Image: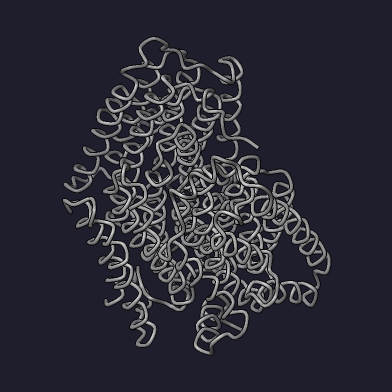
């Protein structure tokens, strides 16, 4: 079971690097959606005994991360057809190098930290930290507002992965609340994106430069 | 269970306000619900409900020590909301009224949360509630501020979630159940895994510190405060920042019980001093009086952190300071809102000579200035004095010196801007605008009430208040 889990997490880490290397907005949205679907399925491996609540929870997560949120992002970017690149502020090669360095550092660190016996040899902690670092890089290294939201989603995927360490102990009510808050958050961000699009006629955050000392 | 009404009534009010058909009468929801909240709060203060040891939510001493002043701030701000929304008839107020009421419910929930996950949910909800408030004016500047606020706050708050999970893992690793209630974590404190506790503290400090606006996580604050309607600014500065401060205090008590209290205190002290000093320098360079209030708020948050890091007496002074800051910020924000409407701008280049065209608001603005720069006999003077004295006596004289230096710089910065706005010759544009938006008792009274309250706290602190702050300190530092 652990090896299959590691394969999935490994895939998610690989997708981080693909996301850092891609130049197209639509491709980035697709990669983030795929990562969401892969990570959404992980709880089924951690809790293999058939449990209807876990299945429902997984289904909702996969639907939201894989389909609802990506289509919302596509809707928000519908008018931005003219320029479809992510407009990097940190170039692709430096992003990839930083992302890989972050990944290696995260994995090394995860081997140093005190872990429970059942988490030894699992990529959960290292993978989650690597994903968080990649999310940060996307967040600060891309100037398109949608690409920044994708960065936030990757960051959030990393935190979700870490949260799976506690899957046995955090009450479902709290998990559902966290999921709901994140979804509302992305919806609100989508609405703000729409406002930016209408007001500035672009989703490039480099145009948001009025406010400064 | 009575305390749950503090959360449910505002949330129900928000739903009703969202469904209410009339734009003209909807703003009345604000004072009615806030007044019910304040009455309920007073009743709960007189007859405190029992708090079950492992309950997720409770009106415990910590909540009692802070929530009353926030309820009062909401009440006063909501009185201001009626004339404000009447002046801006062209803007739809459905979302505005609903999210303010929802945020009152969520602030109450966050203060009463005794479970890290619940606390996070309430704080994240609160963060999102303020998004429509910041871009209420729909100007490009406001949208830019909203985007920065959303991105920075969401990232910060995501890190605090990661920190909460780390604390849960520390409990699992120590042989516990991973229960995230504060009481369970403290009960298990000696066996919590130390590396994970430290990682959790750093992440939570960064996360909730972003919400408080501590340097270097303060980037969103000047933009959001500068562009949000002044009423929302008052609520952000008074209500939301205190939620984050309380969250830090609760987590700090777990970290201290796990034997890392010294590290937690040092990091709080460092961030507090950094925030104070840098905010003071920013105050010397800004030329916008609402951004000035943001930097002043960063400075006040620094003072709270320093107070909280200096043991029991400092903590008591921090609670006293929080009350003062909440009301003084409310007063000065609301009067700044009047001045902004009269001048049509909040930069010192365009807003001049406002004393001649809006004398009452200018007087209140100046009174607010003296209050937030801690001039006696306002309450802030006494709370800051107490923190400085405590720093001297607990072996941190250099902290006291830096503290005083930052206060002095901030005083120069604040008076420079306030006097340049109040005195001088008004611009023609301002004269026309101020006849359109003339001063009314309803826009002046809220500020006056708050200034009066800060003055009152400076002249005497009622014994029940002293008692609730002492109880809160006792809860945080049990073996006193």
Residue A6 shows in the view: yes
Residue depicted at 51% across the width and 49% down the height: B342
Nearer to me, B248 or B373: B373
Point out the image quarter for the C terminus of chain A: top right
Image coloring type? one colour
Q: Is residue B446 left or right of residue B43?
A: right
Indicate the quadrant where residue A147 lies. Answer: top left
Residue B303: horizontal and vertical position, in percent? 66, 63
Residue depicted at 49% across the width and 88% down the height: B464
Residue A153: horizontal and vertical position, in percent? 40, 33
Indicate the quadrant where residue B269 lies. Answer: bottom right
Residue depicted at 69% across the width and 71% down the height: B384
Nearer to me, B64 or B129: B129
Residue B41: horizontal and vertical position, in percent? 36, 77
Residue depicted at 57% across the width and 71% down the height: B324
Point out the image quarter for the N terminus of chain A: top left
Residue B196 shows in the view: no
Residue sitting farthest toward the bottom: B463
Q: Is residue A145 left or right of residue A61?
A: right
Nearer to me, A75 or B205: A75
């Amino acid at each position: 079971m652990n090896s299959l889990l590691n394969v999935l997490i490994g895939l998610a880490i690989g997708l981080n690097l693909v996301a850092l290397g891609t130049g197209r907005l639509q491709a980035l949205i697709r990669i983030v959606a795929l990562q969401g679907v892969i990570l959404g399925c992980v709880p089924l491996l951690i809790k293999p005994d058939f449990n209807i609540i876990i299945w429902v929870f997984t289904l909702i997560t996969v639907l939201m991360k894989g389909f609802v949120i990506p289509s919302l992002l596509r809707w928000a970017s519908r008018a931005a057809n003219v320029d479809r690149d992510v407009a990097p502020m940190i170039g692709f090669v430096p992003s990839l190098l930083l992302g890989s360095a972050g990944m290696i550092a995260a994995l090394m660190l995860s081997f140093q930290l005190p872990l429970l016996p059942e988490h030894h040899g699992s990529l959960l902690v290292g993978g989650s930290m690597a994903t968080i670092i990649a999310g940060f890089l996307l967040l600060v290294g891309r100037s398109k507002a949608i690409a920044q939201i994708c960065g936030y989603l990757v960051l959030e995927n990393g935190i979700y992965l870490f949260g799976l360490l506690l899957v046995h102990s955090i009450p479902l009510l709290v998990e559902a609340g966290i999921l709901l808050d994140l979804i509302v958050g992305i919806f609100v961000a989508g609405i703000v994106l729409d406002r930016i699009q209408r007001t500035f006629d672009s989703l490039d955050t480099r145009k948001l430069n009025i406010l400064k000392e | 269970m009575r305390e749950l009404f503090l959360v449910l009534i505002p949330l129900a009010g928000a739903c009703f306000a969202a469904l209410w058909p009339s734009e003209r009468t909807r703003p009345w929801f604000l004072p009615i619900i806030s007044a019910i909240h304040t009455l309920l709060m007073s009743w709960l203060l007189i007859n405190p409900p029992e708090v079950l040891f492992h309950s997720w939510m409770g009106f415990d001493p910590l909540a009692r020590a802070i929530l009353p002043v926030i309820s009062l701030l909401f009440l006063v701000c909501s009185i201001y909301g009626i004339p404000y929304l009447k002046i801006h008839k062209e803007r739809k107020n459905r979302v505005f009224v609903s999210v303010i009421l929802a945020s009152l419910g969520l602030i109450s929930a966050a203060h009463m949360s005794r479970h890290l996950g619940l606390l996070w949910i309430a704080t994240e909800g609160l963060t999102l509630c303020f998004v429509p408030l910041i871009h209420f004016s729909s100007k490009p500047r406001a949208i830019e501020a909203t985007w920065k606020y959303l991105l920075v706050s969401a990232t910060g708050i995501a890190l605090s979630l990661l920190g909460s999970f780390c604390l849960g893992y520390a409990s699992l690793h120590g042989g516990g159940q991973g229960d995230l209630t504060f009481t369970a974590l403290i009960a298990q404190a000696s066996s919590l895994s130390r590396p994970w506790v430290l990682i959790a503290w750093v992440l939570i400090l960064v996360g909730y510190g972003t919400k408080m606006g501590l340097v270097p996580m303060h980037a969103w604050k000047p933009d959001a405060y500068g562009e949000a309607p002044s009423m929302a600014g008052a609520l952000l500065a008074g209500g939301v920042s205190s939620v984050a401060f309380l969250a830090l205090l609760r987590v700090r008590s777990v970290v201290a019980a796990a034997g890392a209290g010294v590290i937690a205190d040092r990091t709080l002290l460092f961030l507090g001093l950094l925030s104070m000093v840098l905010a003071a320098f920013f105050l010397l360079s800004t030329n916008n009086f609402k951004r000035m209030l943001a930097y002043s708020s960063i400075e006040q948050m620094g003072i709270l952190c320093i107070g909280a890091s200096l043991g029991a007496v400092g903590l008591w002074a921090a609670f006293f300071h929080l009350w003062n800051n909440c009301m003084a910020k409310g007063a000065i924000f609301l009067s700044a809102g009047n001045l902004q409407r009269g001048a049509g701008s909040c930069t010192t280049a365009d807003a001049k000579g406002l004393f001649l065209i809006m004398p009452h608001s200018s007087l209140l603005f100046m009174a607010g200035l003296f209050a937030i720069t801690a001039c006696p006999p306002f309450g802030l003077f006494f709370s800051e004095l107490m923190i400085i004295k405590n720093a001297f006596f607990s072996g941190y004289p250099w902290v006291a010196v830096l503290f005083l230096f930052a206060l002095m710089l901030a005083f120069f910065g604040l008076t420079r801007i306030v006097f340049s706005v109040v005195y001088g010759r008004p611009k023609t544009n301002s004269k026309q605008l101020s006849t359109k938006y003339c001063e009314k008792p309803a826009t002046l009274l809220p500020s006056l009430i708050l200034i009066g309250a800060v003055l009152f706290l400076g002249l005497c602190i009622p014994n029940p208040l002293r008692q609730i702050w002492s109880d809160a300190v006792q809860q945080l530092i049990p073996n006193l």
